[in-house]
Every structure is written in C-alpha cells, then in structure tokens.
Amino acid sequence: MITTDFVPGSPCMLDVGVPDVPAAASFYGAVLGWDYEPMGEEIEGGMFRKDGKMVAGLGKLTEEGARPAWMIYYTVADADATTRAVEAGGGTVRVAPTDIEQWGRMAQYSDPLGGQFAVWQPGESKGVDLVDAPGSLCWTELYTSDAAGARRFYGDVFGWRFTDMPMPGGEGTYTLITPAGQPEERMHGGLLEVGEDALSLAGGRPYWHPVFAVADCDAAVAQVNENGGTVQMGPVDAEGVGRMALCLDPFKADFVLLTPTEG
C-alpha cells in the first residue's frame, strides 16, 4: 500500500516524458480522469491533477535516443549518499543530484542492467498528493532479466526488504518490495524476472512501470483504445489482486491499470 506519508525508499513522485505534451495530456485525461496544469510558457510540461490533487508530472522528451516512458521517484534522506550507493553497486548516474528550487533535490540513475529510476530528497514538496485511490499510483513494478541482481542492487541502495511469492500456475516467482523498517502493509511494489521478449520496449534493458488504480478496468481500457493507446495484456483477473491490464500510451510509454480486489 502506497501512502502520502512518504518514508525513505517509498515511491513519492512520477512523471512521463513524451514527444507531444498536449497529446499526452489529452490521452491521460481521457483514461484516468486527470486535469493537466501547464507550468508556464518557458517549460513545455506541467502537472496532472485528480480532483485538484497532484498525481503525476508530464514533460517534453528531450534526451536524444530516449524512449517515452514513466519515471518513478523514490524518497531518500540524502540524494548525494544515494548517488554514492548507486555507483558502489554498479549503477550509473544519469542526472547528478540537483536542487529544484526550494521544492527538493532530485537525481536519476540506471541500475547495473540499464533500468532507469530516480530519487527525490524532499524540501517543501514531499511528492504527489494522491495515491492508492482511483486515478492515482497504487503500485510500482520492475521487469528485469536478473531478479537476484536487482534484489542485491536495490537492497543496497534503498535497504528494501523482499518477500517472494509463487506466481499462479507455477509461472515463476514474484518478489514483493517493502521499505526498510516498515510493516508488510507498506509494500509498494514488486519485481519480476522476465525473458527478452518482455523487455523489448526498452531494448532488452529492465524497466519500471507504474500501476494506476481505476474504478473500472474495462472502461479505462476502452478509453486507452479509443484515444490512440494499445493494450499489451488484459484485462484479466488476478486472484487476490484485482482486474488489470498492461497498456501503452500513444507513444508506447507503458503502465498498468488495476481495479483492486475489495478488501
């Protein structure tokens, strides 16, 4: 369960980089009921809000060769110390720790196999205002070709605690992630070892994607299809989890829609 009582190692922010900001704003507005708030004329991007509460960011993709994708930020107490841990674990610094005015300090990295993620050292802004509710982030997930390596790296960087559970039908192991020192109800994500075909979106590299809660998965999937997105898997019912679908926006940034099982 993700909450806005952000603790070190918990997801706190996310944004999506795309080549066409207005088109993405329209797409996510239709699928998730988000309102887009531009940041101003000098920056091509802004914030998404749900019922007035900030839920995500949107920006123009400017990095040469980068694919449109969601970036997930995790809370840290010290972005510089986290950077040293990333480098010690074999990861790469993509954006060195940078102050974002009075709001906080951010950095972006790649794990040893190329999976991209980011951190946020809070200042005046702790992160998004709404989570674990329809139209907001409710889970984070890593697809990787090396689950054991991912556990070592992210465990060293964030101190995460991992719990393995068998996949339905004996299709492998799913690893649940809990922030250090937190009870199981604060689990915020999972990681799954997959084959090369499942990593084709990122050119064979691991990648994180967000899971968004929705009141009606089938209705949200219909909006994905009607607004230029595609559905890679689902909707399907996952026992004990809910009804879910793996989707791509019009620029092939991936995300999951989930109507959680009640209770």
Image: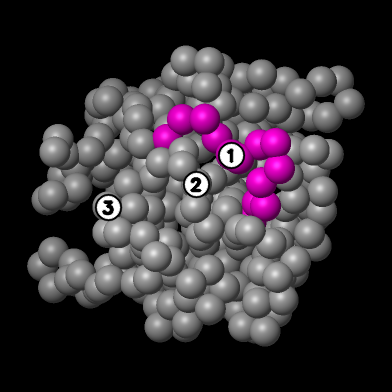
* Amino acid on which disc 2 is placed: Phe
Task: Classify mark 2: helix, strand or loop.
Answer: loop
Q: Earlier in the sequence, mark 1 or mark 3?
A: 1
Q: Which residue is mark 3?
A: 185
Q: Which residue is mark 2?
A: 6
Label 2 and label 1: CA atoms lie apart by 8 Å
User: For the point 67% across and 23% down, which residue is it?
Assistant: 22
Q: Nearer the viewer, residue 63 or 80?
A: 80
Q: Is residue 80 above or below residue 68?
A: below
Q: Is most of the magenta stretch helix, strand or loop?
A: loop
Q: Is 126 covered by the magenta stretch?
A: yes
User: In this orientation, which residue lies closer to the viewer: 246 or 112?
Assistant: 112
Residue drawn at x 40%, y 83% as measured from the top left: 148
Horizontal arrangement in the rendering, residue 256 relative to residue 45 (left or right) = left
Measured as percent of width and height from the top left, residue 97 is found at 78, 59
Marks 2 and 1 in Cβ contact (< 8 Å)? yes
Q: Is residue 229 left or right of residue 162?
A: right
As shown in the figure, which amino acid type bears the numbered disc 1?
Gly
Callout in the foreground (2, 1): 2
Q: Which residue is mark 1?
A: 127
Range of magenta residues: 119-131
Inspect the image, locate mark 3, and give the three-letter code of the amino acid beneath it.
Glu
Which numbered disc flags the more N-terminal residue, 2 or 1?
Answer: 2
Tag shown at residue 109: none
Picture layout, residue 136 above or below residue 155: above
- Relative placement, left or right, of 92 versus 135 is right
In whole angstroms, how far apart are the C-alphas of marks 2 and 3?
14 Å
Q: CA distance from mark 1 to mark 3?
A: 20 Å
What colour scheme was applied to this rendering of the protein?
one colour
Which of 4 and 241 lies nearest the eye of the viewer?
Answer: 4
State yes or no: discs 1 and 3 in contact (Cβ < 8 Å).
no
